[in-house]
Amino acid sequence: MCGRYTLVADEDALETRFDARFRDTAFTPRYNMAPGQELPVITDAEPATFQRLEWGLVPSWADDDSGGLINARAESVDEKPSFEAAYERRRCLVPADGFYEWVETDDGTRPYRVGFEDERVFAMAGLWERWEPETTQTGLDAFGGGVDDGSERGPLETFTIITTEPNDLVADLHHRMAVILTPDAERRWLSGEAGREVFEPYPADEMRAYPVSTAVNDPTTDEPSLIDPLGTA
């Protein structure tokens, strides 16, 4: 699975890389992006803009906004009810420059950071959804002009990251890895032209993995030292 990732490039570099612009608030580097946080993605609805969506997809038909799905399996993403509608018409790019995996060792669980040797930014294949609460009236207010129980809650926009079989590097760490798109495939993915052929594991040749501090285990910790290889901090 992909349960944490990093994006430490600066705003100008990201805007140039993806030919998209941040709006409203500036981007600051992130060293421990975690589920439940609002994070930058590029959607097919606004391909020239970085939007902030919450990580953990909530299907539009869900009864409530709990239990967001952080990953979608490539093998079933086009047929599973939680994802099939988004696969057809709500795709997104999830920018990153690394992701974390955890390995069981004799000394306990050890986190590793995985990325490219040159630390370049890449895009993971994602899906997004919009969930809106039902506005039902309750009590005496239901008879008179009243108050609805969803009046203070607006639409929730969420995303998930698609995972596939691991390449030779990640296989030593975990049995799944995020779908990393080639630059050529990014716009084809957004436009809907690309299909399951982009779900092949990204080749391991240019990638590396190295152990990092267990401080990354705490999703509230977000600082540069988290991506330092052990022994160099």
Image (cartoon, grey):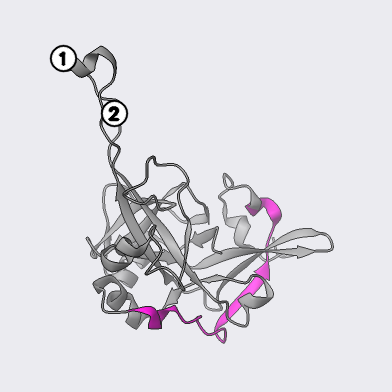
Disc 1 versus disc 2: distance between alpha carbons? 19 Å
Q: Which residues are magenta?
A: 195-216
Mark number, residue 233: none
Mark number, residue 152: 2
Residue under label 1? 144
Is 209 magenta? The answer is yes
Q: Is residue 133 above or below residue 143?
A: below
Mark 1, residues whose alpha carbon is within 10 Å: few (<14), some, or many (≥20)? few
Q: Is residue 147 above or below residue 7?
A: above
Residue 190 in the image: state x and y as whole percent: 28, 71
- Kindly identify the residue that appears in the image at 57 percent across and 87 percent down: 205
**Please, what secondary structure does the residue beneath circle 2 have?**
loop
Nearer-the-camera pick, 184 or 171: 171
- Looking at the rendered structure, the kind of residue marked 1 is Gly
Residue 95 in the image: state x and y as whole percent: 41, 65
Nearer-the-camera pick, 26 or 74: 74
**Please, what secondary structure does the residue beneath circle 1 have?**
loop
Q: Earlier in the sequence, mark 1 or mark 2?
A: 1
Q: Quadrant of residue 21?
A: bottom left
Q: How many marks?
A: 2
Q: Nearer the viewer, mark 1 or mark 2?
A: 1
